[in-house]
Structure formats: structure tokens, C-alpha cells
Image (cartoon, grey):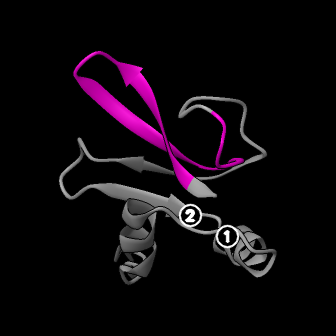
């Protein structure tokens, strides 16, 4: 399963997006870390290793509802500075 694992201090959460066996605890030992999610930035920052997510989905991993929503959002265009 691909789901969120909570990190950070109390009332200051940020999350790792992990591939983990479904029966393990929320913050149990993951198989692989495939991204990060920080809801405290404006807008919230999401980073995925999309090739690894696609690999795990092809092997049968299911995304949690929240990770599915984050993954389906369009990739933001890189910021180009004119200097």
C-alpha cells in the first residue's frame, strides 16, 4: 500500500509518502519512501518519485485515498527566473 507516514513535531506535521505493507502500523518500517507532503506551506508542497510510484502500482500496490488525490494533481511547472 502507498500511504502517508506522519513526521514532525506536535502540531507541526509533515508527511512521508511510503510504500508499506497494509497490516503494518502507520509509522512502521516502510519498504520504500517515494515522496514527501508538507501541508504547512502555502500552497502545500508535494514531491513524488513518480517513476517509483508507477513501478509499485504496476506491482499491485494500492494508494490510500489521500495519496491518490495528491498524486492526481497536476505537476507544477518549474519556475524560471529571468536574470
Query: Element under label 2?
Result: strand
Q: Magenta includes 9?
A: yes
Query: Element under label 1?
Result: helix
Which quadrant is the C terminus positioned in? bottom left
Q: Are marks 2 and 1 in contact (CB under 8 Å)?
A: yes
Q: Magenta includes 4?
A: yes
Residue 30 quadrant: top right
Question: Could you tell whether 59 is left or right of 35 in the image?
Answer: right
Residue 9, relative to residue 3: is it above or below?
Answer: above
* x 36%, y 72%: residue: 69
The residue segment tinted magenta is 3-24
Picture coordinates of residue 70, whole percent (x, y)? 38, 68
Residue 58, relative to residue 53: is it above or below?
Answer: below
Picture coordinates of residue 55, whole percent (x, y)? 78, 75
Question: Could you tell whether 62 is left or right of 83 in the image?
Answer: right
Picture coordinates of residue 36, whole percent (x, y)? 50, 49
- Among numbered discs 2 and 1, the one appearing first in the sequence: 2
Residue 80, relative to residue 48: is it above or below?
Answer: below
Residue at which label 2 appears? 48
Residue 14 quadrant: top left
Measured in 3D between alpha carbons, the distance from the residue under mark 2 to the one under mark 1, in whole angstroms, is: 8 Å
Amino acid at each position: 500500500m502507498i500511504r502517508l507516514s506522519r513526521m514532525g513535531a506536535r502540531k507541526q506535521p509533515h508527511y512521508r509518502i511510503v510504500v508499506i505493507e497494509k497490516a503494518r502500523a502507520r509509522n512502521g518500517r516502510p519498504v520504500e519512501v517515494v515522496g514527501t507532503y508538507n501541508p504547512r506551506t502555502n500552497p502545500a508542497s508535494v514531491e513524488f518519485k513518480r517513476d517509483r510510484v508507477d513501478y509499485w502500482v504496476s506491482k499491485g500496490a494500492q494508494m490510500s485515498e489521500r495519496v491518490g488525490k495528491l498524486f492526481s494533481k497536476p505537476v507544477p511547472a518549474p519556475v524560471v527566473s529571468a536574470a
